């Protein structure tokens, strides 16, 4: 039985949202995935994935020689089909050079000239569903909601790392609540996390998650809450370790960034804050209990596909006008079971 190949070298969140596609393809046979070295650990232990092939397209595998090396590896794999979840010209060329006869991607992708089958890219669908439709085609009328939720699989080492991090946290009965204040996109960072944390600290033991670069944001939050009510986990866990930690929390409050999708994969109640971007782009939360926090009705939203480093108009109203009390109300709503 020949295997399928999925090429997904976009952002971390995109890789998480590719997992429903992987699960669908795994029903038909083995599935291998090409992704970035940063994202590859996300797919460790995933039952739908036979092999993860890291592709360092901006590092050691850059340029024509790197492309040719990977194309030879694809050819050796004798894949029956390739699913271009990352629709760049380079990804399409890679699958073509690798000799994959059937190449499926979106009709609006930059690499569509290389595709043998083009699937409609429907803007108002969630991206998890859009990706899933690469496997099932355009003719399926509706996607099963449970099949659309992404899945990640932390292992015993990931859970042990979380246990070690929480070892000295006082066991006073307070539930954990996670905050993810970071983003690589400047205007996606909601500036009122410290004010929200000050209101949440009497109710929860707060955990700040993120990369090492987010440590200063954790410090700003700690200045409002006090260190005794806050655990700074920035840079202290792997991606799957962070997912395991999120799974132990009563909720996650996050910007439109990768932790949002980790929470969806772990089923943790989520409050997702959107400023320059909008959920209609297809990247909203998929956790069973979720809320969107945003300033509706601004003519300048959305201003960017990802979120520029600075507000193009200089006022940053999409985030400044979203006050902590509104987000607190959303937290209370998602943490109370229906």
Image (cartoon, rainbow, N blue to C red):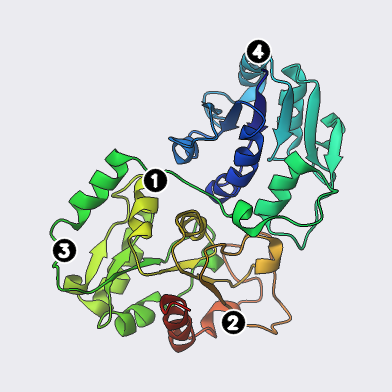
Q: Nearer the viewer, mark 4 or mark 1?
A: 1
- Contact between marks 1 and 3 (CB within 8 A): the answer is no
Residue topped by disc 4:
72
Q: Looking at the image, is mark 2 or mark 3 earlier in the sequence?
A: 3
Q: Where is residue 239 drawn, in percent x and y?
A: 40, 46
Q: Is residue 154 left or right of residue 14?
A: left
Measure how far apart labels 2 and 1 are at the Cα level. Answer: 34 Å
- Contact between marks 4 and 1 (CB within 8 A): the answer is no
Residue topped by disc 2:
317
Mark 1 Cα within 10 Å, few/some/many (few <14, many 20+)?
Answer: many
Measure how far apart labels 4 and 1 are at the Cα level. Answer: 31 Å
Q: Looking at the image, is mark 1 or mark 3 earlier in the sequence?
A: 3
Q: Looking at the image, is mark 4 or mark 2 earlier in the sequence?
A: 4
Disc assigned to residue 240: 1
Secondary structure of residue under mark 1: helix
Q: How many marks?
A: 4
Residue topped by disc 3:
169
Q: Where is residue 204 drawn, in percent x and y?
A: 28, 76
Secondary structure of residue under mark 4: helix
Q: Nearer the viewer, mark 3 or mark 4?
A: 3
Q: Is residue 293 left or right of residue 296?
A: left
Q: Is residue 327 visible?
A: yes
**Occupied quadrant, residue 70:** top right
- Contact between marks 2 and 3 (CB within 8 A): the answer is no
């Amino acid at each position: 039985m020949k295997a399928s190949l999925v090429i997904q070298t976009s952002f971390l969140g995109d890789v998480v949202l590719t997992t429903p596609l992987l699960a669908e393809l795994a029903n038909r046979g083995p599935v291998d995935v090409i992704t970035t070295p940063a994202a590859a650990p996300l797919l460790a232990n995933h039952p739908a994935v036979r092999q993860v092939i890291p592709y360092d397209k901006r590092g050691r595998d850059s340029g024509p020689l790197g492309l040719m090396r990977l194309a030879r590896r694809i050819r050796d794999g004798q894949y029956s089909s390739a699913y271009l979840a990352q629709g760049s010209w380079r990804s399409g060329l890679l699958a073509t050079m690798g000799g994959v006869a059937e190449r499926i991607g979106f009709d609006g992708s930059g690499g569509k000239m290389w595709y043998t089958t083009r699937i409609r890219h429907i803007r108002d669908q969630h991206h998890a569903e859009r990706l899933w439709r690469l496997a099932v085609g355009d003719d399926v009328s509706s996607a099963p909601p449970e099949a659309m939720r992404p899945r990640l699989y932390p292992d015993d080492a990931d859970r042990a790392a979380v246990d070690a991090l929480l070892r000295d946290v006082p066991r006073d009965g307070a539930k954990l609540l996670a905050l993810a204040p970071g983003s690589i996109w400047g205007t996606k960072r909601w500036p009122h996390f410290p004010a929200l944390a000050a209101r949440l600290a009497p109710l929860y033991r707060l955990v700040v998650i993120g990369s090492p670069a987010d440590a200063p944001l954790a410090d700003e939050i700690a200045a409002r809450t006090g260190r005794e009510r806050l655990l700074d986990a920035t840079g202290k866990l792997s991606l799957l370790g962070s997912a395991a930690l999120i799974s132990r929390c009563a909720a996650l409050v996050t910007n439109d960034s990768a932790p949002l999708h980790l929470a969806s994969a772990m089923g943790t109640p989520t409050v997702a804050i959107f400023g320059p971007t909008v959920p209609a782009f297809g990247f909203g939360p998929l956790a069973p209990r979720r809320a969107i926090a945003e300033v509706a009705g601004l003519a300048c939203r959305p201003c960017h596909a990802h979120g520029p480093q600075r507000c193009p108009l200089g006022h940053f109203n999409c985030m400044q006008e979203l006050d902590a009390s509104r987000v607190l109300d959303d937290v209370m709503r998602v943490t109370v079971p229906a």
